[in-house]
Amino acid sequence: MIRKLPRRALAAAAAAAVVLGGLAAAPPASADQSALEHCVLDLDTGAQTCYDGFTAAFAAASDGRITDAPDNLEGASGGSLQELRAETSRLMEDAAAGGANGDVIIGTFFEHKEYGGRTLTIEADRPCRNNDAQDHWGPTMPPGWNDIITSLQPWANCWIELYSDDNFGGDRDGAYQTNTPNIGAYMNDRTSSIAYR
């Protein structure tokens, strides 16, 4: 048996089809927006700047002192990560000796496992002291980074703790002390605040 829909229902369905069709035909995000997937957050000022490659982001975070970071760390291990760790250690030592402006890179976070996808590199005014007190903190995630993190790399003597809620609330995992290609199911895509010890 075929039922006829009332005219109002037909008109609503037609209007919805026009709206949905318009959404489907909407132009994709501009290349400028989608290309800027590697961000640097200055914890001291709260400023976030994004770049089109990890090499450019890491160079900016190090104030131009590390310019040879690989542009793609996905699946990286061994030599390339050891070289990057050695360079960030030199940066930390320079900052401790009063060199440059004193900023150091304290962590890098990745959207996907094995250091893939978008990146967020954090810079601060000093390394961590590892004295069981928070040296640096991010009570909320910067725009576009809430519930995104899947892998991470701690730098500048920092141990990283991840929290599922803003202001260090909810579930906690860590402290991550070494490069971690997969933080595991417990906190995957759940980070809303971060503490650095």
Image (tube, helix red, strand yellow):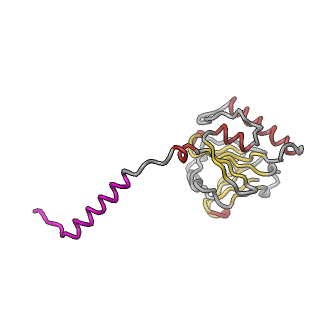
Is 163 on the left or on the right of 45, as rendered?
A: left
Please, what is the dominant secondary structure of the magenta stretch?
helix
Q: Which residues are magenta?
A: 1-24
Q: Position of residue 78 (x, y in %)?
A: 68, 30
> Which is more toward the observer, 49 or 91?
49
Q: State which quadrant residue 82 falls in.
A: top right
Quarter holding residue 6: bottom left
Residue 152 in the image: state x and y as whole percent: 65, 45
Residue name at image x 80 percent, y 50 percent: 128
Compared with 5, 86 (above or below) is above
Q: Is 49 left or right of 117, judged from the image as shown?
A: right
The answer to which quarter of the image holds residue 132 is: bottom right
Task: Work out whether 127 lies above or below 140.
Answer: above
Towards the viewer: 61 or 108: 61
Say which quadrant the N terminus sits in: bottom left
Residue lying furthest top in this view?
Answer: 79
Question: Residue at 64% of width from left, 39% of height from top?
Answer: 54
Give the image location of residue 18, x and y in percent.
30, 58
The furthest residue to the right: 97
Q: Position of residue 102 (x, y in %)?
A: 83, 47
Magenta stretch encompasses residue 135:
no
Q: How many numbered dots are placed on residues in this image?
A: 0
Q: Any magenta on residue 11?
A: yes
